[in-house]
Amino acid sequence: MMRSLLSRIPIVVLFVLFVLFVASSAIAIAAPPEKGQTFQAPGATLYVEILGSAAGAPLVVVNGGPGFDHTYEHVVLPGTTSPWETLARTRRVVFYDQRGNGRSGALKPGQSCTLADQIDDLEAVRARLGADKIDLLGHSWGGYLVMAYAARHPEHIRHLIMVDSAAPKWSDNVFLFKDIFPEGQERSNQLAFADAMGDAAASAAGIREYFHWLFYAPEKRDAFVSQVDPRVFNKPVNESIVHDLPRFDLWPELAKFKFPALVITGRYDINVAPSVAYRMHKAIAGSQFVVFERSGHLPFFEEAEPFARALESFLGGAR
């Protein structure tokens, strides 16, 4: 009944970091042991992990999805340092698992999971940190979420960063899969029926196909993919949020942003075309625009050191 989501991208946009094509897929990132803890927010149990201990405004990092946890952001190339660890030398860097995902509490029958809920959960994380002002970064779907949060709670934003973000209006996203990888798109489409029927082998084949489309450098792609192992994808979370998003248009909100903003894109991001990022930059008065010339959808992985430097330059000292 459900076709491959890669074949439906113009209609249904997931902005999952690495699985856009099958809501029943099962994947996860192998990551270092987590050192965070859960707390009870007003509407959900949320898991929070903090790197660093410096005083001042923390950097809160909001991952892609919907329907995945934050652990993919911990993956690094062998022998390199995570940009988050670099940034954590001078500030707290905060990750959390969104409602219903990862180590946060699973959704209960009938529990709401909408954009409004996600905004409220992010506000609960901020309050938990005891920080009146935060630096806020969102990647992919997380970019959409941080823009929505900033529109509702501008008084709490010190700096706002969008990394390869979804467009402020869901239907304005630009995908290049079929144009850049037409043969891969065809192979993925051929897997659609078996995948929808629950064929695990077809799902795995589709995942392997899609991974090849996210990176600029093949060796970095292979290093990332080698750290992936199966885990159940949270389909109810994904479907609930994706169903909710088409009714919103955040473009008018961007013109109201008065805080410093940075829009980042990988030059070779075919998951969210750089034209989307540039349009967002032009819509936010005074914003900065940075392109990582040797990255696809994950510049914090492919160009970790330059990425950390760009953020340190933009954020300045924690205060």
Image (spheres, helix red, strand yellow):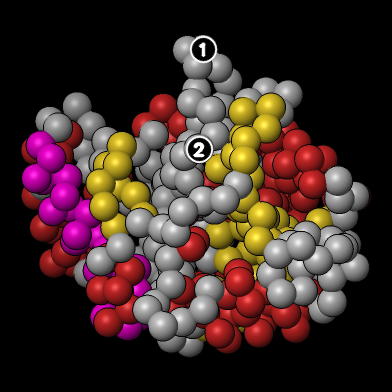
**To which residue does mark 1 refer?**
110
* Residue at the top extreme of this rendering: 110
Residue plotted at (51% across, 51% down): 34
Judge left or right: residue 117 versus residue 192: right
Give 28 or 289, whichever is nearer the viewer.
28
Judge left or right: residue 42 versus residue 77: right
Give 191 or 229, whichever is nearer the viewer.
229
Label located before the other in sequence (1 or 2): 2
Q: Nearer the viewer, mark 1 or mark 2?
A: 2
The magenta-colored residue range is 199-218
Judge left or right: residue 310 versus residue 305: right
| Three-letter residue code for mark 2 | Arg
**To which residue does mark 2 refer?**
103
Separation (CA) of disc 1 from disc 2? 20 Å
Residue 85: image quadrant is bottom right
Q: Secondary structure at mark 2?
A: loop
Horizontal and vertical percent for residue 80? 46, 82
Residue plotted at (22% across, 43% down): 4
